Image (cartoon, grey):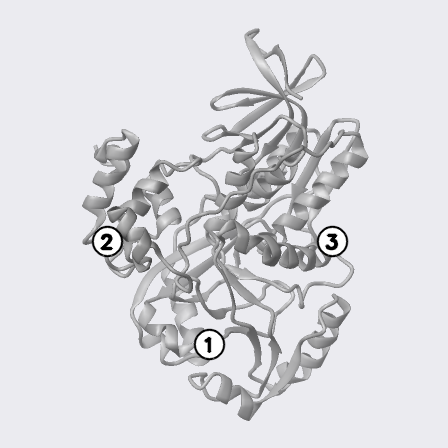
């Protein structure tokens, strides 16, 4: 349990049992997992919100792990993580839909590779794949571009909300006593009185054990502890989101036959009712290179034109970029150092969303083996997040809820049908929205085809009123 010690400046400081660095989906899952034990934990994040890095900008696929490299830690944890999120996700209120995937072969060479991919899936413990011949493929996906040869069906691939998942895991951690320190970038690490002192941009955090789940910056944190085992080279992925009118064009996630470096460009429905095309795969030196490029978007449209020709004639709602935490290694870089009371969960690439809860259990077991005492709490408080998925009832669709609380019948964002009640709830949540981007991830407000053109003023006014922020600050205007 936590105790009082002294920080590096001599002032009294709470000494936590464990500090988790990084509040992406992996760090949030680890915090939730450790929140089940009689420990004082703190989740430390450089950004001003949970899940703002790699976690928020991916393809939002809940992978079966069918194409992972057999025998790797990634393959094992993705497989287990898939099952854990299917078990716990609905209870937490995470939108998840089972749409299945079709791995489409466009050439005879790719067709020949399907049998090997099915064998790899079976080796990874997933035996539900099946070959789909050309005629059936076009019955399953009638808008697919001409020239497809065959496909491999992967029926248990799901789509999932990339925003609710880290928020739900972090919220359940906070509900069970885990402290959350946002806007606290770890800059240095020192030792004092047998504990680590994390010197952050927002003051010191003192903890006996540290778990590094810093995503794109995991190698930087690892080096602060004296290790030099991997370097993160961000892999930039550009994606295009098409309007909801495009949703009837695709029934499954349509995957390409993967290469050694990328899973390739896919077309997939989203839980918000849109269709996403992407990602590209480009290694970049800049860990903040989140701007789209004309070349990248043109490349995606070219590939999309072949996969689903009618899609590229639909209106584009948004584009975005995700940076995957790729390293020189092909597997996750998870290590434990009992002598330092330190664990590293680095090199977690695009599969981290799926594997997050399994990584958390793996880390907890590793900490136990390294000497951290884990005793279950007598009670664990469960939470449920507001639904922002399109396949499940939204507040404005629930007459009893609207009758009891008329704010849920007052639609503010008409593109995404977000109500005044949802915006106010998000501003008052256990991990509240404090920015317009944070509000978008919690409610979908200003997330639709007009991108806030019609509703942003009212959305901003409501968020400002509920949080005490000024509209100018929220809009980042002088």
Near-viewer residue (5 or 237): 5
Residue that carries the numbered disc 1 in the rendered image: 251
Please say if the residues under marks 1 and 2 sit with CB atoms less than 8 Å apart: no
Residue that carries the numbered disc 2 in the rendered image: 411
In the displayed structure, 456 sits above or below 398; it is above
Res. 286 visible in picture: no
What secondary structure is found at the residue carrying circle 3? helix
Q: Quadrant of residue 429?
A: top left
In the displayed structure, 226 sits above or below 71; it is above
Near-viewer residue (195 or 369): 369
What secondary structure is found at the residue carrying circle 2? strand
C-alpha distance separating marks 1 and 2: 29 Å
C-alpha distance separating marks 1 and 3: 31 Å
Res. 342 visible in picture: yes
Between disc 3 and disc 2, the foreground one is 2
Q: Position of residue 226 (x, y in %)?
A: 70, 29
Q: Residues within 10 Å of mark 3 (few under 14, many from 20)?
A: some
Residue that carries the numbered disc 3 in the rendered image: 73
**What residue lies at 56% left-to-right and 9% top-to-bottom?**
12
Quarter of the picture containing the N terminus is top right
What secondary structure is found at the residue carrying circle 1? loop
Dot 1 or dot 3: first in sequence order is: 3
């Amino acid at each position: 349990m936590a105790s009082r010690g002294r920080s590096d400046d001599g002032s009294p400081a709470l000494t936590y049992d464990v500090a988790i660095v990084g509040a992406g989906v992996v760090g949030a899952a680890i915090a939730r997992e450790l929140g089940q034990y009689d420990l004082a934990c703190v989740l430390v994040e450089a950004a001003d919100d949970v899940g703002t890095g790699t976690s928020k900008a991916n393809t939002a696929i809940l992978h079966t792990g069918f194409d992972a490299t057999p025998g790797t830690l990634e393959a094992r944890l993705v497989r287990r993580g898939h099952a854990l999120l299917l078990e716990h996700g609905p209870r937490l209120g995470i939108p998840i839909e089972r749409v299945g995937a079709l791995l489409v072969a466009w050439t005879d060479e790719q067709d020949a590779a399907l049998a090997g991919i099915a064998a790899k899936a079976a080796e990874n413990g997933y035996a539900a794949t099946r070959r789909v011949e050309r005629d059936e493929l076009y019955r399953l996906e009638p808008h697919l571009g001409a020239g497809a040869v065959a496909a491999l069906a992967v029926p248990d691939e799901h789509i999932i909300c990339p925003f609710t998942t880290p928020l739900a895991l972090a919220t359940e951690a906070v509900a069970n006593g885990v402290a959350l320190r946002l806007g606290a970038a770890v800059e240095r690490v020192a030792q004092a009185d047998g504990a680590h002192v994390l010197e952050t941009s927002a003051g010191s955090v003192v903890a006996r054990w540290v778990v590094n789940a810093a995503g794109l910056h995991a190698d930087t944190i690892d080096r602060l502890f004296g290790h030099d085992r991997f370097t993160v080279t961000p892999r930039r992925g550009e994606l295009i989101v098409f309007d909801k009118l495009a949703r009837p064009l695709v029934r499954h996630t349509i995957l390409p036959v993967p290469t050694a470096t990328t899973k390739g460009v896919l077309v997939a429905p989203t839980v918000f009712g849109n269709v996403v095309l992407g990602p590209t795969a480009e290694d970049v030196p800049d860990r903040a290179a989140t701007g789209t490029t004309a070349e990248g978007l043109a490349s995606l449209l070219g590939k999309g034109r072949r996969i689903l020709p009618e899609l590229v004639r639909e209106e584009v709602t948004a584009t975005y970029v995700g940076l995957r935490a790729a390293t020189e290694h092909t597997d996750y870089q998870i290590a434990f150092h009992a002598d330092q009371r330190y664990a590293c969960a680095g090199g977690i690439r695009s599969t981290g969303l799926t594997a997050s809860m399994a990584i958390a259990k793996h880390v907890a077991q590793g900490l136990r083996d390294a000497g951290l005492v884990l005793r279950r709490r007598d009670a664990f408080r469960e939470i449920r997040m507001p639904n922002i998925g399109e396949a499940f009832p939204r507040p404005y669709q629930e007459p009893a809820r609207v009758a009891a609380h008329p704010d849920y019948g007052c639609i503010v964002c008409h593109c995404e049908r977000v109500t005044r009640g949802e915006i106010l709830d998000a501003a008052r949540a256990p991990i509240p929205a404090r920015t317009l981007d944070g509000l978008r991830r919690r409610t979908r407000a200003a997330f639709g085809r007009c991108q806030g053109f019609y509703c942003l003023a009212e959305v901003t006014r409501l968020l400002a009123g509920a949080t005490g922020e000024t509209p100018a600050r929220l809009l980042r205007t002088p």
